[in-house]
Amino acid sequence: MTKRAAVIGAGFGGLALAIRLQSAGIATTVIEARDKPGGRAYYWEKDGHVFDAGPTVITDPDCLKELWALSGAEMAADVELVPVTPFYRLTWPDGTVFDYSNDDPELERQIAALNPEDVAGYRKFLDYSAGVYREGYEKLGAVPFLDFASMIKAGPSLARYQAWRSVFSIVSGFVRDPRLRQALSFHTLLVGGNPMATSSIYSLIHKLERDGGVWFARGGTNRLVSGMVRHFERLGGKLRLADPVEAIESDGTRATGVRTKSGWRESFEAVASNGDVVHSYGLIEGHKRGPAAAAKLKRKRFSPSLFVVHFGVKGALPDVRHHTILFGPRYRELLGDIYDHGRLADDPSLYLHHPTVTDPGMAPEGHSTLYALAPVPHLGKLPIDWAVEGPLYRDRILQVLEERLIPGLRDRITTLFHYTPQDFAQDLGAHLGSAFSLEPLLTQSAWFRVHNRDDKIPNLYFVGAGTHPGAGIPGVVGSAKATAGLMIDDLAR
């Protein structure tokens, strides 16, 4: 291995990229600021509980298995994936419960119970979702958009599926029941997008889940991360933890290496960053590209942040599904509060993660592990002191859970802590505390997103949520495939 590459950040994107590079014979070092790998997929162990920070919804397992197959290995040797069904249990304040899965007869029975006319509309939506999946994911998901010509080439396909329309607008053209419109459009929130503004191309998530299923890594998402690390190191890769990168050094033309807080310094033929894109450009020394690119990025729209309450409770909760969505009384108006107006809603919609219903080993015997997540405005729209507001909002979320899903919840809690937008900013270097980087608008997608290879520094690359194709495990793993292809070709010259 004569060529050497550095990957800054050990999130899913960084690790997937590092595995691809190492599998191709490029000596790769991953440098991670935190004491554990994972990035946003960090975890904590408290009082016998294992708490995943997220993400916790695993889709398209084949994109992960491919990372092992590159070297003739099998992911099953390092990670056990367990199917989750239903994918999500969706609930509304009026008492409606909808189990969302790929069981067509049961799904259509539930749709008919809400509105019989929407069964036919749902089938048409399936066809639409399959089409955008082929064009947007299979054909373009791992293709780097390095020039505007590549965007123009993709234009006819995007136009055929009316990519300028929002997911919610498209869904509303197929089904009429307001609850079904929410059920078929909320997925964009899982990648930081507003269903009312995110391009209809993101309807492909529905097809992605139906075909590939929704999965859980036994032991938690952290076990998937540790499996990736184990495989990377087995291939000869190096992982450096608890040592933040302070600079991407440059000779004025190319990146020459990295320097860390500990004083460690190394030269590399190529440098890739899995870190926040604004933060990453701020690391560049010796090249005017850094400040200019960071300033330009700051003028773009960033996805909201998240407020997450982690808690352990006494007893089992067999009736609480692995993934539960609790829609609030408002949908469009709540999204407006989060994305546009910067208001902290008293009536949040929540995602509840309950891994111990699938894997009791993530809690002490006789206990359960959960977290509740609420999308909230990022720090640029809501610059409040979360040290003060956090405990109040935590209590409000627990109250909603107790009223809607788990009676007597607060009396059963044994372990409790929360994670705020300020933590996203501090721990992950996330600009404005955004949980998903750039908002996935059509005007901030593909070529309009941060490029997988920088335009000015030819051996500087990006991977992860801020670059093409975007956030979510399949997205960042797809970005790793796109970026690795560029790096491998460039380093072979």
Image: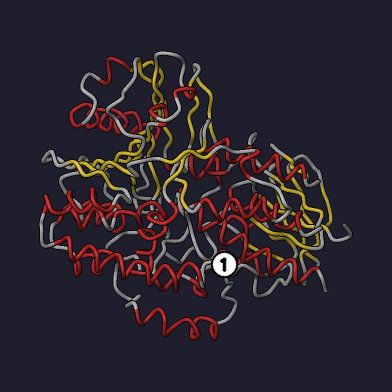
Q: Quadrant of the N terminus?
A: bottom right
Residue 238, image x, y percentages:
78, 44
Q: Quadrant of the C terminus?
A: bottom right
The residue sitting at 37% across, 35% down in the picture is 353
Q: Residue furthest right?
A: 2
Left-right relation of 223 to 18: left
The residue sitting at 27% across, 44% down in the picture is 344
Left-right relation of 100 to 459: left
The residue sitting at 69% across, 60% down in the picture is 284
The residue sitting at 22% across, 26% down in the picture is 402
Q: Residue furthest front?
A: 105
* Residue 184: quadrant of the picture: bottom left
Residue 327, image x, y percentages:
22, 44
* Residue 155: quadrant of the picture: bottom left
Q: What sort of colour scheme is used for the picture? A: secondary structure
Type of amino acid at the residue the image marks with label 1: Ala
**Residue 432 in sight here:** no
Q: Looking at the picture, tell me which residue is in the foreground, 314 or 385.
A: 314
Circle 1: element type: loop
- Residue 443 in the image: above or below residue 368: below
Marks counted in the figure total: 1
Q: According to the image, label 1 marks what residue?
A: 142
Label 1 neighbour load within 10 Å: few <14, some 14-19, many 20+: many
Residue 76, image x, y percentages:
61, 41
* Residue 242: quadrant of the picture: top right
- Residue 242 in the image: above or below residue 450: above
Left-right relation of 264 to 20: right
**Residue 190 in sight here:** yes
Residue 321, image x, y percentages:
32, 34
